Image (cartoon, rainbow, N blue to C red):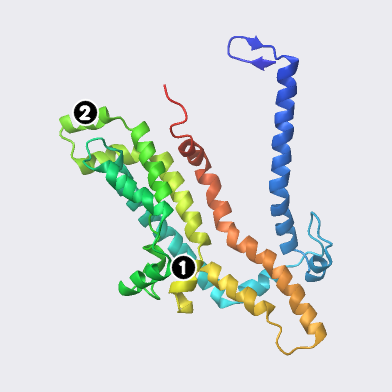
Amino acid sequence: MIETKNRRIRESLGDRIFLGLTYLFLITILLVVLYPLVYIASSSFSSPEAVSAGKVWLWPVDITLDGYKTVFQNDQVLLGYANSLFYMVCGTLISVALTIMVAYPMSKKTFYGRSPVMIFITFTMLFSGGLIPTYLIVKSLGMIDTRWALLIPNAIWVWQVIIARTFFQTSIPEELGEAAEIDGCSDWRFIFSVVIPLAKPIIAVLALMYAVGQWNAYFDALIYLKTQAIYPLQLVLRSILILGNAAGTVDASEMVRRQQLAELMKYSLIVVASLPVLIIYPFVQRFFVQGMLIGSVKG
């Protein structure tokens, strides 16, 4: 029975079967997605011997913090955390601001030449100059081995511009801008007082996408950065794994111990690197759902 405000609607047998199969399918998908996360978290708190022997299945075995101690004993990890937070926060602010500055004019019918400009922007999704020309441009701008190299070259993603433009077209009517103009509202005042408050869902979507992209990025840092003091966390963790896998001249027992510890560190590093994103996501999840449904219902 489905209860409504005034009456109850009796479900047919077919509806109940369909609903049951739907719940079963969703629960199966949930378990498939959730189990690897639980396994990684459990392995990160288990002993190196238990992890290497494959004894960890669901819950931690011989609980220990050796993996996390080994990770955080490296001073570069905390510095990398601070650098990644800086890149994520500043990069997200820059990217969201630039995306809105590009997408909002593209959504206005009165913007002359918006179609050719949008075609030109979309063209970059299919063709790019490549790694070497991009590196030469970054070098000519004097951004090599600076923080700007991780903030400016990939500040705008074309797909995010398209999403934001679609939101502005479908959610902010032209009549609203005309009414504000009649009341003497300037363009800047209209943007900050009307557009941005109404665009909270899409801003949350853009911020989440850009923040996750900035947090997980390491390739640009690997290419453009040389000074370890400005390395992001991902690059620091990569260096730790490489050094952990380097055996050197040690005896067999020490080599086995290092290999076991390196295997444990992999799980600890995954948890350490994923924690900020897992913390941020619940706070923007409802806006994320609203933003991804842009244009899906019209009427």
Q: Amino acid at mark 2?
A: Ala
| Residue drawn at 28 percent across, 45 percent down | 116
Residue 158 position (above or below residue 80) = above
Closer to the camera, 268 or 224? 224
Residue that appears at 37% across and 68% down:
148
Residue toward you, 294 or 194: 294
The image shows residue 291 at horizontal and vertical percentages of 46, 38
Image quadrant containing the C terminus: top left
Left/right placement of residue 92 relative to residue 116 reads right
Q: Are marks 2 and 1 in contact (CB under 8 Å)?
A: no
Which sits earlier in the primary sequence, circle 2 or circle 1? 2
Secondary structure type for disc 1: helix
Count neighbours of disc 2 (C-alpha within 10 A) and say few if under 14, some if 14 to 19, many if 20 or more.
few
Residue 128 at x, y percent in the picture: 40, 59
| Quarter in which the N terminus is drawn | top right
Residue, disc 2: 179
Query: Disc 1 designates what residue?
Result: 220
Residue 207's x, y, as percent? 44, 50
Q: Picture quarter containing residue 241?
A: bottom right
Instruction: Report the Cα–Cα distance between label 2 and label 1.
Output: 46 Å
- Nearer to us of marks 2 and 1 is 1
Taking the spot 33% from the left edge, 41% from the top edge, the residue there is 196
